[in-house]
Amino acid sequence: MIISFIPLSPISRSAFGDNSLDIHPLFVRPSHTSETDVVSMDLQDLIESALQHNPSLQMIKQQQVQRQGQLTQARSGNLPQLRVESEYKYLQRDDRDANLDQDSEEIQKEEGNVLTGSATISQLLYDFGKTTGSINVGKANLQAIEDKLFREGQDIVFQTKEAYYDVLEKKRLINVAAQAVDNYKRHLKRAKVYFAVGSRTQIDVIDAEIELSNANLKLIRAKYNLEVAKVNLVQVLGTQPNRGQYVIEEIPGLNLENLLETMPSLPQSLDALVKLAHEKRRDVHQLQALIKAAVADVARVKGNYWPTLNARASVDDYDTSLSQYDDSWEVGVDLSWELFSGLRTNGDVVEARGKLREKEALLMKLELTLATEVTENFIRADENRVSVSIALQTLELAKKNLFLAEKRYEAGRNDMIEFNNAQFNLTKSQSELVSTYFGYLSSLARLEFTVGTTLN
């Protein structure tokens, strides 16, 4: 199962105007490149790629293979054990004839090839739970690693979403910085015209050039921040899809006009989420499985106090002319009981019980912190949701303020400082809206991860 929360809509390309700067092939489909050279990837495509290539997930998959092998080893104790041996040797034997006088020097000699074949089969009959305990330990450990694998997959899904939203956020912030550059360019051009006709001083021109230079610097920083975000995304994916020839699709359908109506809402109530987390969190299931393994291990170790009963049958076949070797077979039952082991079994039992108590304490700790984690992430998500609404209102006010500042400057009723402040507030409001919106999407993804299942 894959946790999948795809927001209903993103900020559109024209969210902050038409000054969109796509600066990397990650987002730009080059006009000279054929459709077959570049693949388009949405969020679900990125998640599937991460689940396939992320090295952390691959490591746990190999741990799962190891647990399967350990379970097979444990089950072998209940199956018959068959051993076949073969030996070849050349033998020379001197043997005094027993019917002759003791002082006689007449000695019989035998020599020849000896080819031996033997087969032994044994079957465990009963060992007071030692083998059964080992099998139960193996089953529980396998279930625990499967739960760990599932939880790691959920973590990778969350990391992919977070990195994806971060890339989209940094791309939008480039658009914000680019719009600010365009506004300062227009204002510089206007200041130069006013200076040429003598209605403004050269100070206005210099101030406009300084602000334009600062805006360009912020644009460069925004571009490099995007590059860093893309590197982080690739690290989560564990690979460069299609050898780097791919574009990331935007979240479809969102624009500023319907942002509040189309943005995903917080699912369910907090109490329901806490209850759901106790049911669905696979790390809780993992600890429960480890507790089962620890209980089975205690039973396995206690079995060492008691004997082991085995059935055994063997046959020996000799291919030789020597008289001393005759074919033989035997069937029997053997009982082995270690009556005293220097208190080793006592120590093993104490250790196994200690591990059981440790796992129980870890489960109790996780259950106590689970409600706190869900509550905190729910509050953060709700905070971001409310902040989006406030950021939209602030943006509208900043747009009006810049419009009035431009008109007042054109009419000669204010100076450059008022315009610069208005432009600064607009850029800040746009940036806050972008960061808050994508922060809200990331907080929803984190809430899903905390609860341990998809939230509708």
Image: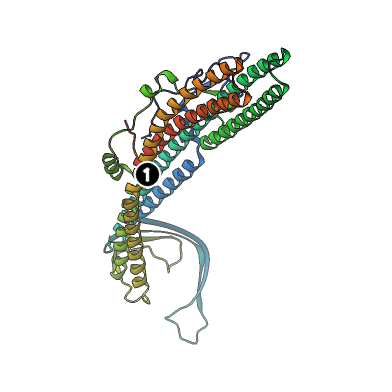
Q: Picture coordinates of residue 2 (x, y %)?
A: 38, 34
Quadrant of residue 452 within the rendered picture: top left
Residue closer to the observer: 378 or 318: 378
Is the C terminus in the top left, top right, bottom left or bottom right quadrant? Answer: top left
Q: Looking at the image, how many numbered discs can be counted on the residues?
A: 1
| Scheme by which the image is coloured | rainbow
Q: Farthest residue toward the top? A: 197
Give, as a three-letter code, the residue at label 1.
Glu
Q: Position of residue 129 (x, y in %)?
A: 27, 61
Between 335 and 303, the one lying in front of the other is 303
User: Residue at image x 65%, y 27%?
Assistant: 211
Question: Does residue 33 lie above or below 56 as drawn?
Answer: above
x 36%, y 71%: residue: 347
The residue most toward the bottom is 103
Q: Nearer the viewer, residue 286 or 337?
A: 286
Q: Is residue 365 above or below residue 405?
A: below
Is 119 or 374 nearer to us in this picture? Answer: 374
Whether 61 is drawn above or below 298: the answer is: above
Measuring from the top left, give residue 21's x and y in whole percent.
59, 21
Q: Residues within 10 Å of mark 1 (few under 14, many from 20)?
A: some
271 above or below 110? Answer: above
| Residue that badge 1 annotates | 376
Q: Is any atom of residue 92 visible in this view?
A: yes
Secondary element at image label 1 = helix
The percent position of residue 155, horizontal first and vertical second, equals 43, 40
